[in-house]
Amino acid sequence: MRFTGKTAFITGASRGIGEAIAVRLASEGANVVVIGKSVQEDPRLGGTIHSAVARVNEAGGRGLAVQADIRDEEQIIAAVQQAVSIFGGIDILVNNASAISLAGTTDMETKRFDLIHDINVRGTYLVTRHCIPFLKRSSNPHILTLSPPINLNPLWLGPYIGYTMSKYNMSMMTLGWSEEFRADGIAANSLWPVTTIDTAAVRNLLGGNSLAVRSRKPSIVADSAAFILASPSRTCTGNLFLDEDVLASHGITDLTDYAVAPGNELQMDLYVEK
């Protein structure tokens, strides 16, 4: 029960990877603040902040559902204050909320470009900014951001520069925060899956069921996150991790059970060259 007494603040935790991390930490005793916009289920997406909290509680943790749009700074501040008033502090911040659009420069509408950067960049920055004062009070504080290694191969920059810029910005913030808050003992790391993950985004936006069956389950990211977040914050910081590498460093190399359809060829995720 490595997370007993610890409080995790997780954005975009209504479903998918965010929810999987929430449930994983709860299974080892964490209090989990589930941040998201969804209070009524969209059949195309599934999940709400309330259904995620139900899963957190069933797993053995204590959940708190907070409706918040991280594009709105006042809502972020209120969510952080609510988390601290209920649980007494924040030990872990998981920046999972993100928007995606794999469109080229002339195809991406300005409003979509603004949305992606408002959530992925500005939202991540502001959530972290307002959690920092409470992370400084924790005995083992961690910031974990779901963003990729910074790969400057034009293969990744050319097709969808708007989205790529936003995700690389998240990774640059990780590297910046690891140095800025090193003396405070706050770890800042990023985590990214080697393969695509079976989420609503994959099924609805990227490739449908044909891609989902060549993907892994969100649990592989959740298990990797748990290893990172349980590590000593003063020594495990400034990394842009891949999930396979995290698991391998803990002796886990047989990843068969994480596959949605074991035996199928897996689809490599964006920004990964292995």
Image: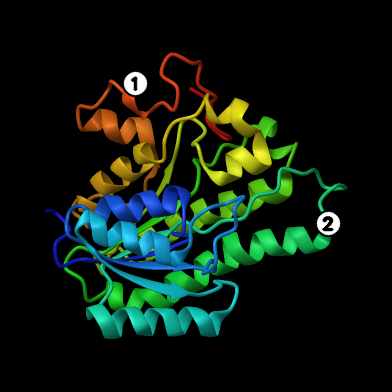
117 or 200, which lies in front?
200
Q: Amino acid at mark 2?
A: Glu
The residue at the point 36 percent across, 29 percent down is 258
Q: In percent of the image, x 55 and y 61: which residue is there?
A: 41
Which residue is nearer to you in this view: 63 or 129?
63
First of labels 2, 1 by sequence position: 2
- The spot of residue 78 in percent (x, y) is 44, 85
Q: Is residue 195 above or below residue 108?
A: above
Count the marks: how many?
2
Between label 2 and label 1, give the one nearer the viewer: 1
- Residue type at mark 1? Thr
Q: Quadrant of residue 186?
A: bottom left
82 in relation to 217, above or below: below
Which residue is at 46% across, 48% downward? 16
Q: Residue 70 occupies which quadrant of the picture?
A: bottom right
In the picture, measured across the screen, residue 168 lies left or right of residue 17, that is right
Q: Which residue is mark 2?
A: 109
Quadrant position of residue 62? bottom left
Residue occupying the far right of the picture: 106
Q: Is residue 58 above or below residue 190?
A: below
Q: Position of residue 87 (x, y in %)?
A: 24, 78
Which of 115/139 is in front? 115
Mark 1: few/some/many CA within 10 Å (<14, 14-19, 20+): few
Determine contact: label 2, label 1, CB under 8 Å. no
- Nearer to me, 181 or 90: 90
Q: Which residue is mark 1?
A: 256
Q: What's the CA distance linking mark 2 and mark 1?
A: 40 Å
**Structural crowding at the residue carrying mark 2, measured as other residues with C-alpha within 10 Å and reported as few (<14), some (14–19) or many (≥20):** few
The image position of residue 30, as x and y in percent, is 21, 62
Task: Kindly identify the residue that appears in the image at 59 percent across and 53 percent down.
Answer: 43
Identify the element where label 1 is drawn: helix
Check disc 2 and report its element: helix, strand or loop.
loop
